[in-house]
C-alpha cells in the first residue's frame, strides 16, 4: 500500500441514485455536472457519486493515501475529482443520513485532495429499489493534491454512458431529469432544500 492511512469498508445507503462525500464545516468543491464523467459530480458544495440503483445499499471501501496511488484493477468505471476539506474531515454519507461508519478521506488534515472513485455493478439493477442482495461496489482513494480538472480514467458500463449522454444541468431542455416538471426533479429539489434547512 502506498502510504495509506486506515482503510475501511461499509454498506452505504443510496437515495435518488447517489451517495455523497461531504465536510461537516463547509463546501468541498465547485459544482460539476454528472455528465462530465458519468460517475462523480459536485453539487451544493458536496461530491456526489452516481449509482445505478435508485434506492438501497452499496458496498463502499475508502483508502486514504499520503501520496498518489495507482488505480485499482478490476473496476468498470474510474473517475477523479478534486476537492478541499475545510475541517480535515471528508466523510462518505447518504443524502439525508449521518456519515457512514468509514474513516475520513482527509487523512492529512484541511488541505486540497484528489479523489479517485472506482465503480462496479452499476448495470446490475438500474433504477431498482432495495433488493435482497447488494450488487454495486465502490472504492474511493484519496490523497493530498493540488486542484486539477475532473478526469474519466475508465468507462465501460452502460449506465455511465447513459449519464454522460444527458445534457448538462445548465442546459434548458424539456423533461430533463432535474426539471421541476418531472417527479425526479421535484424530489431532488426537495432534498436539496431540506439539506440547506429550507423547508418552505
Image (spheres, rainbow, N blue to C red):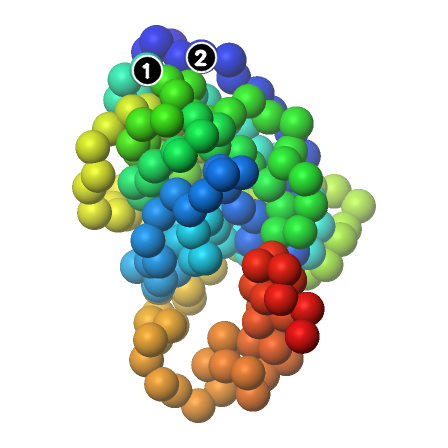
Which of 58 and 103 lies nearest the eye of the viewer? 103
Q: Residue at x 21, y 39 (%)?
A: 147
In the image, taking residue 137 as reference, residue 46 lies left or right, namely: left
Secondary-structure class at tag 1: loop
| Circle 1 crowding by C-alpha within 10 Å: few under 14, some 14–19, many from 20 | some
Which of 29 and 133 lies nearest the eye of the viewer? 29
Residue 36: x %, y % from top left? 30, 59
Which of 145 and 89 lies nearest the eye of the viewer? 89
Asked whether residue 134 is in view, the answer is yes
Q: Earlier in the sequence, mark 1 or mark 2?
A: 2
Which of 69 and 104 lies nearest the eye of the viewer? 104
Q: Which residue is mark 1?
A: 66
Residue 104: x %, y % from top left? 51, 25
Which part of the image, by quadrant, shows the N terminus? top left
Is residue 174 depicted above or below 17 in this figure? below
Residue 193: x %, y % from top left? 59, 66
Is residue 172 depicted above or below 74 in this figure? below
Amino acid at each position: 500500500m502506498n502510504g495509506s492511512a486506515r482503510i475501511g469498508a461499509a454498506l452505504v445507503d443510496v437515495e435518488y441514485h447517489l451517495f455523497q462525500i461531504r465536510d461537516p464545516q463547509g463546501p468541498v468543491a465547485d459544482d460539476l455536472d454528472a455528465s462530465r464523467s458519468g460517475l462523480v459530480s459536485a453539487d451544493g458544495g458536496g461530491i456526489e457519486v452516481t449509482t445505478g440503483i435508485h434506492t438501497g445499499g452499496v458496498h463502499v471501501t475508502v483508502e486514504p493515501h499520503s501520496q498518489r496511488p495507482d488505480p485499482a484493477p478490476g473496476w468498470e468505471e474510474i473517475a477523479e475529482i478534486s476537492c478541499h476539506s475545510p475541517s480535515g474531515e471528508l466523510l462518505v454519507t447518504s443524502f439525508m443520513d449521518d456519515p457512514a461508519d468509514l474513516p475520513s478521506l482527509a487523512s492529512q488534515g484541511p488541505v486540497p485532495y484528489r479523489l479517485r472513485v472506482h465503480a462496479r455493478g452499476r448495470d446490475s439493477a438500474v433504477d431498482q429499489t432495495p433488493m435482497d442482495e447488494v450488487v454495486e461496489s465502490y472504492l474511493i482513494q484519496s490523497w493530498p493534491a493540488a486542484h486539477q480538472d475532473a478526469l474519466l480514467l475508465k468507462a465501460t458500463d452502460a449506465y455511465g454512458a447513459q449519464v454522460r449522454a444527458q445534457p448538462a444541468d445548465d442546459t434548458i431542455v424539456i423533461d430533463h431529469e432535474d426539471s421541476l416538471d418531472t417527479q425526479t426533479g421535484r424530489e431532488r429539489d426537495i432534498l436539496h432544500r431540506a439539506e440547506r434547512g429550507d423547508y418552505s
